[in-house]
Image (cartoon, rainbow, N blue to C red):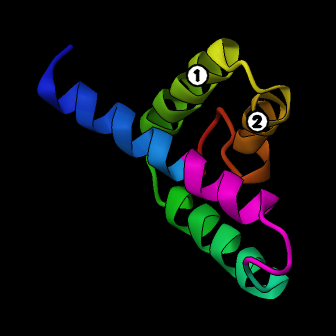
Amino acid sequence: MQREEALIRTLAELVVDLAWFFESCDDSTLDPHDAVKQLEWIAYKLDALSAEDRLSLIALIRERAEAEANPAFREFMEGFPEAAGLNEEGG
């Protein structure tokens, strides 16, 4: 795997992991309004991606979801692209 590809894969995983944290943490860990704000911020930043980058990110998320053992996290990842406003056609 090339260095740039490894970096992109790692960053994509971090985005999904952070989104999962904001989505799944309980109210005693993080204020629900703050969690929603952070999820909206993630979607806002992803909205700036080109159509090609959106497709790449969706593919990485789907690939990871297929290999995920945790059913709740897998379900989250399967729905993440749509929930984050990523569509295959681009912005």
Q: Specify the amino acid type for callout 2.
A: Phe
In this rendering, would 40 be left or right of 59?
Answer: right
Residue 12 x %, y %: 45, 41
Residue 13 x %, y %: 48, 39
In which quarter of the view is residue 36 placed? bottom right
Indicate the secondary structure of the residue bearing disc 1: helix
Please name the residue shown 64% across and 35% down the image. Answer: 89
Q: Are marks 2 and 1 in contact (CB under 8 Å)?
A: no
Residue in the foreground of this view, choosing between 86 and 40: 40
Please name the residue shown 70% across and 65% down the image. Answer: 22
Crowding at mark 2 (Cα within 10 Å: few <14, some 14-19, many 20+): some
Badge number at residue 73 = 2
Q: Would you say residue 27 sits in the magenta stretch?
A: yes
In this rendering, would 23 be left or right of 2?
Answer: right
Residue annotated with mark 1: 64
Crowding at mark 1 (Cα within 10 Å: few <14, some 14-19, many 20+): some
Residue 18 x %, y %: 57, 57
Q: Which residues are magenta?
A: 16-29
Distance from the alpha carbon under mark 2 to that under mark 1: 10 Å
Residue 48 x %, y %: 47, 60
- Secondary structure mainly formed by the magenta segment: helix
In which quarter of the view is residue 66 placed? top right
Residue in the foreground of this view, choosing between 72 and 54: 72
Disc 2 versus disc 1: nearer the observer: 2
- Residue 49 vertical placement versus 76 (above, below): below
In this rendering, would 8 be left or right of 67?
Answer: left
The extreme front residue here reads 28
Q: Quadrant of the N terminus?
A: top left
Q: Specify the amino acid type for callout 1.
A: Arg
The extreme left residue here reads 3
Badge number at residue 1 = none
